[in-house]
Amino acid sequence: MTLMQERIGTTDELDGPRTSVVARVTRILDVFAQTPGQLMLEDVTAISCLPRSTAFRIMTQLVEQGWLEHGQRGYRLGPRAQGIAARGEQDHGRLRQVAAGVLNELQLTTGAVVHLGVLEGGLVLYLDKLGGAALQSVPSQVGGLVPADTTPMGRAMLATHSPEDVDALVAATADRPRRRPLDHDDLHARLNTCRRRAGVDVVRPAGSRGIAALGAPVHGTDGLLASIGIASRDRLDLEKHAPVLLSAARRLTLELGGTRQSGGRRTRSVPATSR
């Protein structure tokens, strides 16, 4: 038995011989990256689907190494993880700076929580979040990573790619936690609908407690650059809010000197007033 196996657990003791230690560590960190605030051990085991003893040993090691912090209210990301997220945000400094005015105006116009995100592989990385009094009503966090196929902002970006590229991007995140199983046919159908809506994707909650959300892509000089989105626990009217969001995305695209994708071809973006 290796030292790593002694400290984290043997392969047979965990969740199957084919799951590596690195994969299990990644699964736990994914839970914290996608869930704001502090989590108890039971929360992590439920979301990650790892045995309780396995999760506890790995999280103890992550605390020792600074990837997690442990307090009376549970676990949260530690200084090493937060430092990486902060450096990632610095890499997108110009995008955030240029987008600031557009995001503030969009938030004031809609009253919804507004996000800015970029596509990192098959994941959405949240770069900014505005929302005033409603900010905490939407469980997302700056620096958080979620599979692109699970959010309107992510699907708005995936819709600018070919089906083959989408499959490759999604495959890279197949092991990431999801609330429901990935359905490739449903995803491609949704992306086709998104393309027919000029790039806007939408989520309508089934019940009154869900979160409604819209997302639209933003392009830079080299093509797809980011996406912006609005989310609210109140009803979002697609006919009313989609044009507002799309106008904001086009304005930001223009300010970044970008183009927009249309039918697989790069075309010059035009202001919403000229359409």
Image (cartoon, grey):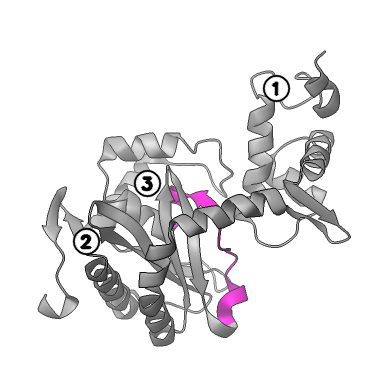
Q: Residue at x 68, y 33 (%)?
A: 24
Which disc is residue 187 wearing? 3
Query: Could you tell me the amino acid type at mark 1?
Result: Gly
Counting residues from the start of the chain, the first of labels 2 and 1 encountered is: 1
| The N terminus: image quadrant | top right
| The C terminus: image quadrant | bottom left
Q: Position of residue 221 (x, y in %)?
A: 22, 56
Q: Cβ–Cβ below 8 Å for labels 2 and 1? A: no
Which disc is residue 16 wearing? 1
Q: Is residue 177 left or right of residue 112?
A: right
Element on which disc 3 rests: helix
Name the residue nearer the viewer: 15 or 69: 69
Which disc is residue 122 wearing? none
Q: How far apart are labels 2 and 1 at the CA level?
A: 47 Å
Q: Which residue is mark 2?
A: 258
Residue 196 appears in view: yes
Q: Position of residue 253 (x, y in %)?
A: 25, 66
Element on which disc 2 rests: loop
The verdict on residue 140 being magenta is yes
Q: Residues within 10 Å of mark 3 (few under 14, many from 20)?
A: some
Counting residues from the start of the chain, the first of labels 2 and 3 encountered is: 3
Vertical order, 10 against 200 (above or below): above
Element on which disc 1 rests: loop
Q: Is residue 50 left or right of residue 208?
A: right
The verdict on residue 43 being magenta is no
Q: Is residue 135 left or right of residue 200?
A: right
Q: Residue at x 36, y 58 (%)?
A: 226
Q: Which residues are magenta?
A: 134-151
